[in-house]
Amino acid sequence: MVDDDGPRVSADALLADAEREGRGRLRIFLGAAPGVGKTYAMLQAARAAVAAGRDVAIGVVETHGRPETEALLAGLEIIPRKGIAYRGRLIPEFDLDAALKRRPQLLLVDEYAHSNVPGSRHPKRWRDVQDCLKAGIDVWTTMNVQHVESLNDVVQRITGVRVRETVPDSRIEAVDEIVLVDLPSDELIRRLGEGKVYVEDTATRAKQSFFRPNNLTALRELALRQVASRVDSDLIERMQGSAIEGPWPAGERLLVAIGGDVAAEGLVREAKRLADLLGAHWFAVTIDRPGHQWSDEQRRCIDGAMKLAADLGAQTVNLVGTDLPGTILKFARVQNVTQIVVGKARRPGIAALLPRATLAQALVGRAEGIAVHVLTSAPTASVPRRLVRPDLGPSGGYLVAAACVLLATLAGVGVGHVVDLPNLSMLYLLAVVIPAIRHGVLPAIFASLLSFLAYNLVFIQPTGTLTIARPHEFLALAIFLIIAVSMATLAGRLREQNRSAVRRTRAARRLYQVTRRLSALPDPESVGEAAVYEVHAALERTTILLGPDDDGGISIVAAWPPEDRLDMPSRMAALWAFEHDEPAGSGTETLPGCNWLFHPLNADGRRVGVLGIEHDPATAPLDGEGQILLQTLGEQVAAALHRARLSTEIRDAKAEAETERIRNTLLASISHDFRTPLSSILGSATSLLDYGSHMDAATQADLLGQIRDEAGHLDGMVRNLLAITRLEAGSLDLRRDWVDIADILNRAVAAARRRGAVQTMLVCVPPGLPLAYADQSLLEQAVGNVLGNALRHAGETAHIVLQATHEGRDIIMTVADDGPGIAPDMAERIFDKFVSGGATRTADGSESAGLGLAIARGVMQAHGGSATLEPTGTGARFALRMPIDERVHTP
């Protein structure tokens, strides 16, 4: 019996193993600082790998002129670097395409955090390494601990230096192996003094700043912790993969709230470190408030912080709500978040003494059962803080506010002698509400202040001055100002919320229209044309859709405005996005110099294409809502394309199945129809050969007649097959001549008699019937097929009448029988291929081919006529109609 309560292999561990299948393995030689010997250690290990028989090549190695390092390159294959033109110089860089073409077992790529020259495929070398790993190449590389993205701020506080070249933590966590290359601080400083790290001038400056003993000790500790964390992760992964039980603690979940502040990236890094310490899954959220518009600077800060959070392994989420703490806490409780990280900006000078409610304070007061970490941030010298002038709105709003106050004042003067003073304030409240509804909060507050001044100057004694003589009027004026500002704020906020609701309703309506339109289209081509038009209409940007072609690449399916070409960088970005299932182009880490942003389209695990939007420098980049809309539209387009392609595949499969069914039916029918006359011919021929000398002349003649008749029957079936083939191919040639219809009918009856027909058959042709200008052979075949159908299904005692008449300019030949007739459900399909009239089987119980009537209809249509089944009381009546030629002859 199997014990179901025993330890089980972790599903996450199995998925991780599956993802690694087919990928190369990455090893990082990690050091605390430059000069500890990372490249030297990597080359030593590479030489050992070569000695062990591995195929090793060097993609790029920086020796920095150190002789002992350069000596280790001897005997190792070096892939030539690629020169990239930049500012009038040709700068050598790692040749990714050459490495992928060479495809060694092991590739050495020094300096994992290196920034590539603009114009390269990827801005960062670690992206090049990822492409090599996806190609199944093992890669060894080097980096210092200060290049770990989440440690960037810590390193700056330790050394005073902001490191610009960083690697996302998600890429560090995906490493298969980390090798720590360590050197005591004193030894490293000694090497620095000997010129083994930098040249003399650079070494002197480095010794005074970065390479101080305390700094190096702290960096060594960071490197050791990084490796220890990796070892712990490896241990847990191995335990889970081997179903080893352990004391697994309940998981923590962390959330960091991101706002439009320059310190947002630092807040994300702190959250990442806390999540690592807790072993927690973490979220990075930003909130869009209806009616609140982020400035360009704030939007850049938010987008940069959210991108950084995604690179560090966070799950990024865009929330929408007016109550910031309430929205955050609602999401946190739904996601079972246990820790919240929020920033609090330090206010300079006297502003710090003024009371002000903050998001951090609101979260602390309302987050029951959730720990809140408040991190105080301050601007740093290396991150410039720009003052953003608030958008005061269009000047027309302030003119409207001033006009409303002026009208309220004039109205108050006009009615002041009949209305009490407190009631006049209602006029000014109306003057505040109107600009609030039409133009927003700021014009409404401006109207409140003007109303306050006008009310005081014109109606409060003494008039004409701002002096207030009576205390109760001062109180009334203060209350009026508070009410006016409050109403202005509420009315303006209501306006902004209404506008936001309208925008979201339009977006929802657009999505509904897109979904409805795309779902009704039958094929991928029409879906593509509709998709690019709808995306262009929604985002107001040039849109293009590319799909897989027969050569293994991608080609343009549709574009709006219509476009049939892409420049080479754009085509490379689109192909990369399709092959790697990641966005590429403008605003991404892959070919960012491209003018297009390409998003891969996937549905049910299948790559269906790439959707691209053009980034015009004169147009503002997509905001958060625009990005969400683009992603949603992409998902809808992918689903529609997948559905259309599945429908096409289903149609093709049905057509193929129908073709196979027809082929099998034809073979089964023909095999029987051919076997019967062949058996008769074989029997008669065998009798003649074996017993012919003992037979009289009459018997021999009878057997020879049977052979002739059955051979004629076979010839008729072959002619039917040839006729249906020519009809299907549209290559039926008519050899017209003047034909007597009476002869055609009589020949058909005679042929039926020769094949053994016993039914009563009568031919009726009126005198003076015009001659037909037709193909005699085909016409005989058509009439013979219709007569043969009647003979098979009417019964041996049936009476069959073949008649010819003419109506107007048509000759009509009819074949009528008094048999059981045609079933109603068969009447509409009787002339289709492989459909038999009347009973579905011949007299001997075998299935008939069902080609005769289809051939008869085709022959008559080729003559410009028709073949129809006419209603009758009993039996069946077939009519073959053809036009009389203008050069008509009468017999």
Image (cartoon, grey):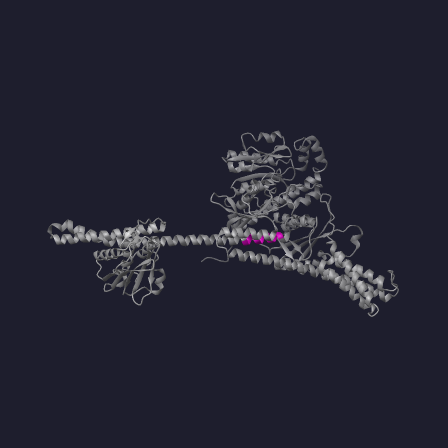
Quadrant location of the N terminus in the rendered image: bottom left
Viewport quadrant of the C terminus: bottom left
Question: Between 60 and 441, which is closer to the camera in this rendering?
Answer: 441
Residue 827 lies, in percent from the top left, at: 35, 62
Tag count: 0
Residue 477, image x, y percentages: 82, 64
Q: Nearer the viewer, residue 258 or 516?
A: 516
710 horizontally vs 825: left or right: left
Q: Is residue 407 magenta-colored? A: no
Where is residue 418, by image quadrant? bottom right
Q: Quadrant of residue 396?
A: bottom right
Q: Observer-nearest residue: 397 or 811? A: 811
Residue 184 image point, x, y percent = 66, 37
Taking 271 as reference, is 672 left or right?
left
Tell me if residue 13 can be seen. no
632 drawn magenta? yes
At x 23%, y 65%, the residue is: 797
The range drawn in magenta is 626-636
What is the chief secondary structure element of the magenta stretch? helix
Quadrant location of residue 743? bottom left
Residue 361 visible here: yes
Picture coordinates of residue 855 (x, y %)?
Answer: 32, 54
State the residue at coordinates (17%, 53%).
703
| Direction from residue 850 to residue 4 in the image, left or right | right
